[in-house]
Each structure stands twice: as C-alpha cells, then as structure tokens.
Amino acid sequence: GENVEQHPSTLSVQEGDSAVIKCTYSDSASNYFPWYKQELGKRPQLIIDIRSNVGEKKDQRIAVTLNKTAKHFSLHITETQPEDSAVYFCAAAAGGGADGLTFGKGTHLIIQP
Amino acid sequence: NAGVMQNPRHLVRRRGQEARLRCSPMKGHSHVYWYRQLPEEGLKFMVYLQKENIIDESGMPKERFSAEFPKEGPSILRIQQVVRGDSAAYFCASSPGVDEQFFGPGTRLTVL
C-alpha cells in the first residue's frame, strides 16, 4: 500500500518569512495530492490540492509543487501570518481522489511574531 | 448547504461497551470515508463506502469494527467491545466522487 513521509515534524518561522513542508510517497499509482490544515480540536480543512497531470499550483500565498519522477511534493507558504499556525498534513491517493487518503504524520507550523 | 455532520461529538464508553458513531455526508455526496486520528498523529484511513456498499475496508481492523452506509440515513461506524486503545478522534469525510473530501467535525471517543 501507499506510504507517505512528511518532514519536518515541527517548523518554526518568523512572521513574514516563508515555510516549506515536504512529503514523499511510495505508490506510483497515486495521482491526487491534497494538503490539509488542522487547528487544535478542529476538523482538517483542505487548503490546496494537486493532481499528477500538473507540476505546480498556486493560490495566493500558498503553492504546491509535485515531482512525479522523484515521488515528492511540497507545500510553500509565503509571507506567513500568525493565523497560519496549525498542523499541516499532506496526503496521497489513487483513483483521482476517489480512494481513501494516506496521510503523512503532520507538521506543526509555528509562526513567531 | 450544510457540511458533513457527525454525532455525537464526544462519546464516553466503558471497556466492553459498544460505540456507534454517525456521519451524515454533504448533500449530493454519495462517497463516505472514515478515518481515525490518535493524539499527536496523522489520520489513518479505515473504510470507504458508497450507498449500501463497502468499497475498501483495508484500513479497518477485522474484529470488533464494522461500517455501513444504508440507502436511507447516515453512515454508521460501529465498534463492539471497546478497549482503551480505541480512544481516538474519528473523522468522516464525504465527496461527490473524484474531488476533495470534506471532513466532519469528528467524534472524540474516550474509553474508560
């Protein structure tokens, strides 16, 4: 089955700086890669996703890149703000997203004022 | 359009009791997924259902756990004879098919 590794487990950045979180996956059949943000005690919320037919996608301060050959994908957050503090999870799935998601273990992002 | 609903939000059971967790998907969504999240950990896929069918239950323990999504009514995740290790947050998600999965608020199960 699929295995998703996520690094780092904790990331502390100064407000206004950029944050990068990296994930690798093992199953070449995976073709859908979402990123979720989870605040303490809340539900995971999708912030951006990418499919394997594109290499990069951007939405305002958030971008995701995908390297299918190397089987890794990354989340980039620019101009970080205090409200970006949360746990971020990457995930992978085959079937274009119809299959169950395999999640990484999460990155606790801390934005220092 | 109401989001994914789960109830109860908190559930306390004693060892050996049964836990029933309910999930109502978003309107128009026929795909339901259940995930388990242990403290300080990521979400682990348990089971994927469509109306009246289990599509993939590869992440669900073979014993004590079962799931259904009947033609009418919510999806149910049932845990029989609960043990302390079952204490976790259980999230369900729904999707219309090949797009994003929307998560519910979760049910936090505590086994005493």
Image (spheres, rainbow, N blue to C red):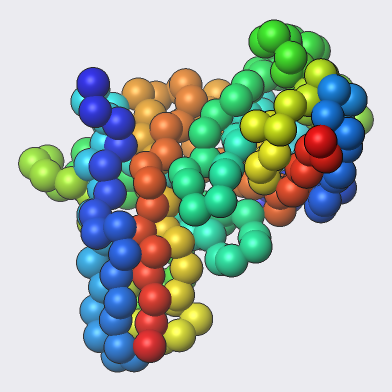
Residue at image location 58% in from the left, 42% down from the top: A38
Q: Residue at x 62, y 46 (%)?
A: A102
> Is residue B28 at all visible to an observer of this figure?
yes
Write down the quadrant of residue B20 in the picture.
Answer: bottom left
Q: Residue at x 39, y 24 (%)?
A: B97
Residue A87: horizontal and vertical position, in percent? 67, 45
Image quarter hosting the C terminus of chain B: bottom left
Q: Quadrant of residue A20?
A: top right
Residue appearing at x 50%, y 81% in the figure? B85
How far from the left and from the top, in percent, is residue B86? 44, 76
When the figure is inspected, residue B88 is found, relative to residue B31, above or below; the finding is: below
User: Taking the image as drawn, is residue B78 in sight?
Assistant: no
User: Which of B40/A105 is in front?
Assistant: B40
Which of B97 and A40 lies nearest the eye of the viewer? A40
In this rendering, the answer to whether A79 lies above or below A93 is above
Q: Nearer the viewer, residue A56 or A31?
A: A56
**Residue in the foreground of this view, choosing between B92 and A41:** A41
Residue B4 higher or lower than A74, as above or below: below
Point out the image quarter for the N terminus of chain B: top left
* As drawn, A33 above or below A91: above
Q: Position of residue A56 (x, y in %)?
A: 78, 12
